[in-house]
Amino acid sequence: MKILITGGCGFLGSNLAQHGIKSGYEVVIVDNFYRLGSKRNLDWLKTQGKFNFYETDIANYEEIKKVFHR
C-alpha cells in the first residue's frame, strides 16, 4: 500500500512516516520545511528506511500534481 503524508517532516508526520516505513508501506512525504526542526526530522527519517520525499507546499497545485504523476 502507498501512503502520502503531507507535513511529513513535522512531529506528528515524521512519527507517522516512521510507522509506515517500519510497517512496510510505500511512504511518500511532502513537506515545505515551514516548522523549525523539520530538516532534523527528515535526517532522522533517512535512518529509518526507504521513502520518497518532495519539498513543496501542498498549496502549489502544479508541484503537487507532479507528485501524483510519479
Image: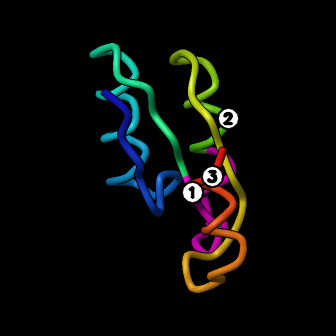
Q: Nearer the viewer, residue 65 or 58?
A: 65
Give the residue at x 31% y 41%: 16
Disc 1 and disc 3: Cα gap in Å? 14 Å
Percent from the top left, x then y, of residue 9?
53, 52
Disc 2 and disc 1: Cα gap in Å? 14 Å
Q: Which residue lies under the disc numbered 3?
A: 69
Disc 3 and disc 2: Cα gap in Å? 25 Å
Give the residue at x 63% y 52%: 69
Q: Quadrant of residue 41?
A: top right
Give the residue at x 51% y 41%: 28
The magenta region covers 30-40
Against 68, is 46 above or below? Answer: above
* Kind of element beneath mark 1: strand
Amino acid at circle 2:
Asp
* Kind of element beneath mark 2: helix
Percent from the top left, x then y, of residue 27?
45, 33
Q: Which mark is residue 43?
A: 2
